[in-house]
Amino acid sequence: MDPTFYGSGNGNVLIDERKYPPEIKAWLKEETALLAKHAHLFNQLVEVGCMEGRFLAWALSGGKKYLGLDVVNSFIETGQEHCRSLKLPQEDYWIQFGDAEKLKEFSRPIQEKALLFFPFNSFGNIQEHLAAIRSLCAIKKPFLICSYATSEAAWQVRSRYYQNCNYSDLHWHSSEAGVTFSSSDGLNTTAYHPQYLVRKFEEFGQMEVQVIEFAQIGRAYLWTN
């Protein structure tokens, strides 16, 4: 995640439900269902790119411990204040700075039976995705990455979504890695091709990642040890 883009507030509109095409609303609903389907795998949810703690309430309602990671100070401060207002024990429920490219450096709060969860294509917003892959391979914790497909249908929905957000000078391009949208406002977000992402996890960590299609335009990547 680009701390400059999100720290400036330009990324806030991406979580404005009024901007969501129907397909994005369906995608988000299915994302939560997909996480719930795999709830038996973990006791602690580690949300990477959590903003102010988007899945904190979900974790609380399901009896899961929660650690939110983000790189934007304003999100972290707001999320921490929310945790305090709920009088939650900090050792079990907290939000802190966490760079997906350097997970091993602050892995102590990540418990043994944890799931690293990358919601709403947060993985596609990471500036150095190869470093993030290497980091996941090093920490060897189960993870679930929720992203978009790279089909024409998914491209069209994403295009409408970003247009609804009124980003200026919106462009897209396809590469060996995936389909990237960018704008002059600083938006830079990628949906990776499954063959590319799966190959990188095999190459860097000999990790066999499961690809899960969901919600017509969604694609998730699951690894369990």
Image (cartoon, helix red, strand yellow):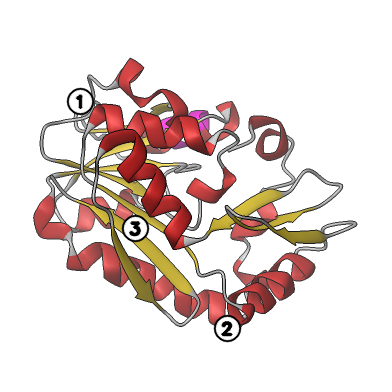
Alpha carbon distance from label 3 to label 2:
23 Å
Label 1 or label 2, whichever comes before in sequence order: 2
Query: In the displayed structure, does residue 93 sit left or right of residue 18?
Result: left
Residue under pointer 2:
22
Q: Amino acid at mark 3?
A: Tyr
Give the label on residue 33, or none.
Answer: none
Label 1 vs label 3, nearer the camera: 3
In the rendered view, would you say 56 is above or below 158? above
Name the magenta segment's main secondary structure.
helix
The structure residue drawn at horizontal position 23% and vertical position 24%, both measured from the top left corner, is 109
Question: How many numbered markers are drawn?
Answer: 3
Residue under pointer 3:
221
Element class at badge 2:
helix
Label 1 or label 3, whichever comes before in sequence order: 1
Q: Amino acid at mark 2?
A: Pro
Residue under pointer 1:
91
Label 3 or label 2, whichever comes before in sequence order: 2
